[in-house]
Amino acid sequence: MKWLKGKWLDLGSKAGKHLQFKETYDRNTKIYTYEMTIIKVVAGDAGAYRCEVTSKDKCDSCTFDVEVEAAHVGDNSENILQAFKRSKKEQPKMEEVDVWELLKASHPSEYEKIAFQYGITDLRGMLKRLKKMKVVEPKKCDAFLKKLEAAYSVDKGKRIILTVEVADPDVQVKWLKNGQEIKQSAKYLLESACNKRSLIINRCNLADDAAYECVIGDDKCFTEVFVKEPPITITKLLDDYHVVVGERVEFEVEVSEEGAHVIWMKEEEELSRDDNHKYRFKKDGKRHWLIINEAQMEDMGMYFVYTNGGHSKGELEVEEKQLEVLQSISDLTVKATEQAMFKCEVSDEKVTGTWFKDGVEVVASDRIKITHFGRIHKLLIDDVKPEDAGDYTFVPNGYALSISAKLNFLEIKIDYVPRQDPPKIHLDTTGNMVSQNTIIVVAGNKLRLDVEITGEPAPIVCWMKGDQVISGGEGRVRVEDRKDLSSFVIEGAEREDEGNYIITVTNPAGEDKAKLFVKIVDVPDPPEAVKCVSVGEDTANIVWEPPKFDGGAPIKGYLMERKKKGSSRWTKLNFDIYESTNYTAKRMIEGVMYEMRVFAVNGIGISQPSQNSKPFMPIAPTSEPTRLIVDDVTDSTCTLKWLDPDRIGAGGIDGYVIEYCKEGDTEWVRANPDLVERNSYMVRGLPVGEKMDFRVVCVNIAGRSPPARLQQAVTIREIVELPKIRLPRQLRTKYIRKVGETINLVIPFQGKPRPVAVWTKDGEPVDPKKVGVRNSFVDTVLFIRSAERDHTGKYTLTVQIENMEDKASIDIRIVEKPGPPVGVKVTDVWGFNAALEWDPPKDDGNCEVTGYSIQKADKKTMEWFTVYEHNRRTNCTVSDLIMGNEYMFRVYSENICGLSEEPTFSKNTATIAKTDLALNQTAFKEKDLSSSPKFTQPLSNRSVIAGYSTAISCAVRGFPKPKITWMKNKMIIGEDPKYLMQNNQGVLTLNIRKPGLFDGGKYTCKAVNALGEDEVECKLEVRALQAEKVE
């Protein structure tokens, strides 16, 4: 689809803010709609426009005119703001001037002044139109036989040839571009062949869009070359985006040319840089980006990018933020001077929040520290005091969500007992304890279990995992002992830390033991075996297997992402957790390769992504084949024909499956083991006399299409058709061919079952060595490679089915040139005439002799001249013979093949006798050509610049030849080398070499002969070069 202005200006390269193009397609009506919008129309937009549509080898166009008129403003349509403006002194009104007429009448040096005075912005465009508007009288040019066209158009990067034809094959031409002479180079090639002169411009670019001239002396011809830029195509399409509010979006597209101009649009609104910098545009070589820093709900929609050669679109989906609590804070019970730590984890690293105690905001201090690192928020309280006890709440900013926990202060009272107490372990069942003696720790977090121990004297503490004793001091897993307190610490919990732990305390008064089970929970492993099991037109069914390790916590569900193959941008398909292990992805583009990946989610967090699925393509089966018909039926076969489906889609067509069954049955039998690529098929092995139903199914990568069925059953029975020969019209008359030509006759016939075709010649079977015959189901071919005279005869074709037959005859005649006539003789001679007679040739070339050609020759010169052509009689009379000459004659025979190879010469000659004639000559009187000198062309006054050679000329006639004398200021010019005097056929020239100021004056040319004299004079003015420059 192209929009053109005038004959050649392609508007596709002018797309921008002034010209905008739009293309839409209605799937229901299958109609394309193309629109061209001109923004802020100016006078230069007026003219003829053409819309041209091309499809394969077909083309159609329509034309229309655009007229631009001045806007009509009514008396009451003035801007009301004019009433509030301060009054100004009225400016004198300028008279309305027709700028076009003003430019036509002005000198080119005044164009810029006029443009400034009348506010002309497109001066160059107006001058181009002005040049076309000027009517130039056609000037007759003798130097050019064929001039350049008015304009040429060429695509960017292509080659163009400008050619003229000149009258003189040896003349030299000059080629000019915008007034500058073009020299031979790899870019510009100058060629000369006979009277043609060519300028070849290789690899045209925008710099070659200019005016060109071809100059021969004072003759010139002009043209303009317009270079059209090729359409910019999109090589990498836009991706779809699915983001949440506040995320950054980057639409990326790649075009075919660097530095190309593209237009970004949302729905039907063009995007531009606004004051708040919401949209940013970036380009690097062939790649262009549209960047939205923080996506909002109103940014959701369809985005388009347009070039002059295509467009692409991508959809942006924006959803509200949903914050998920990955780890909540737990209630704490601490003693005086100990540290209390509240810790929570949310799903967004950028989220900030505020800590509250009993509804009052917690302010950081030396003792109270608030930290935020990634998704983890902490509140640390050192040296806990009784007043620190209370309810603590964390509120994320911007979300209606809060996380609460309680801090309990444990006050310890020690009573002095002078007696011994057995050791006792006091386990705190709150906090990380989810059940009796079971502690759950998130992998990567720190576990610190403080166990209170009582007993007098102080007991000895021993921690063990299985049979391995856990020692104190440094290490990732360690024990820290203090008075009445033993702390079990695991830094960065790992999966191998899970197990049963035993704490044993002993003193002289006894022993106590406690068992603990530490459970390490983590994010699950990625799901496995992600694959696509089926596809539709814009959907795909994805299945996967749960992860092998669930992280120690039940799998809550899954998150899915997809991307186009080759792209690095993943699009989220769901924000809410999806519980099943199969998913139907929708809103995909048919024919585009996609990849999928899945994340598993448990109570701890989100797993790593699974491996990408194998690339798959959403493809739908085609629609059913169309126009299924029965082409032929025999006793055991049925031939079917059909057309391709109306809707094929991106999957194309792999082939067709043909199935049949008896009328009334439901069990279909496949007729073809392999797919059929052609649109016809013969089903074989059918029972005779049965009624059969047939159907055809189209198959592609997406599966089988709906079947196309015949409207009624087909009876399997041979259809008898009488034999019939369809003889072509040109063979119904005598068929004539020349010797040596090829004969190839194709005779169609019909009949069922297959007829038998037999050829005979003159009642006898044709000789296969001389004539070739080829028979098929529907026609027969008679072939003769090189025709001879003996191939002439009557050929009969017989088409027979059992006892029924049809015949057709063809009369073939092979002809050649005739032989020469017989017995040419001169029968009578009288005056200036001679009578000839002859007999027809013995060999007429197997066809009628159409005439004779008679020639004569004088025996002195023996040069033959044709007297008669196509003479149909066997006699003729030759007239206008010259007296005194003796003539010979020869005759050629002629038929439809031409003249005979050899003529027949006359047996005798014809002699034209002389008669008594006398020549009376008149006396020759010589003409007197004498005349006095007379100047036919006088001298002309001249004004020249000093230092530049000049010449003055005049013309004189007279006989005898006059003597020429040149004088300056009445003084004879002698043999001064400064002057060169020439006389060429009466044209007198005085050449003055580099004249000075003293060479100015009156020059006289005098001619003298015996009959008189004549003279002419002129004035020569010599101007100083310096005076010229000052002026």
Image (cartoon, rainbow, N blue to C red):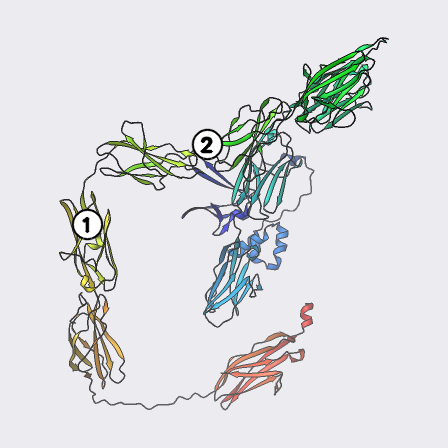
Residue 223 placement, left or right of 669? right
Look at the numbered disc 1 and give the secondary structure of its residue.
strand
Q: Quadrant of residue 573?
A: top right
Front-lying residue, 79 or 554: 554
Using the numbered discs, state the Cα–Cα distance from disc 1 to disc 2 in whole angstroms.
55 Å
Quarter assignment of residue 559 = top right
- The x, y position of residue 770, in whole percent, is 21, 60
Assess disc 1: are there few (<14), some (14-19) or many (≥20) residues with their C-alpha within 10 Å of its C-alpha. Answer: many
Report the residue at 46% width, 33% height from top.
537
Q: Position of residue 544 (x, y in %)?
A: 53, 29
Q: Residue at x 26, y 82 (%)?
A: 862
For this rendering, which residue is in front, 52 or 571? 571
Residue 307 in sight in this render? no
| Residue nearer the viewer, 371 or 865 | 371
Q: Which mark is residue 536?
A: 2
Q: Is residue 284 visible?
A: yes
Does residue 901 lie above or below 693 as drawn?
below
Q: What amino acid is at disc 1?
A: Ala
Helix, strand or loop for disc 2: loop
Q: Where residue 918 appears, x then y in whole percent?
A: 24, 90
- Frontmost residue, 464 versus 818: 464
Q: How many marks?
A: 2
Q: Earlier in the sequence, mark 1 or mark 2?
A: 2
- Answer few, some or many: residues within 10 Å of disc 2's Cα (few below 14, many 20 plus, some between 14 and 19): some
In the image, is 688 to the left or to the right of 540? Answer: left
- The quadrant of the picture occupied by the C terminus is bottom right
At label 2, the amino acid type is: Gly
Above or below, 482 relative to 294: above
In the rendered structure, the answer to whether residue 719 lies left or right of residue 1022 reads left
Residue 171 appears at what percent x and percent y? Answer: 49, 71
Q: Which mark is residue 353?
A: none
Question: Which residue is under mark 1?
Answer: 757
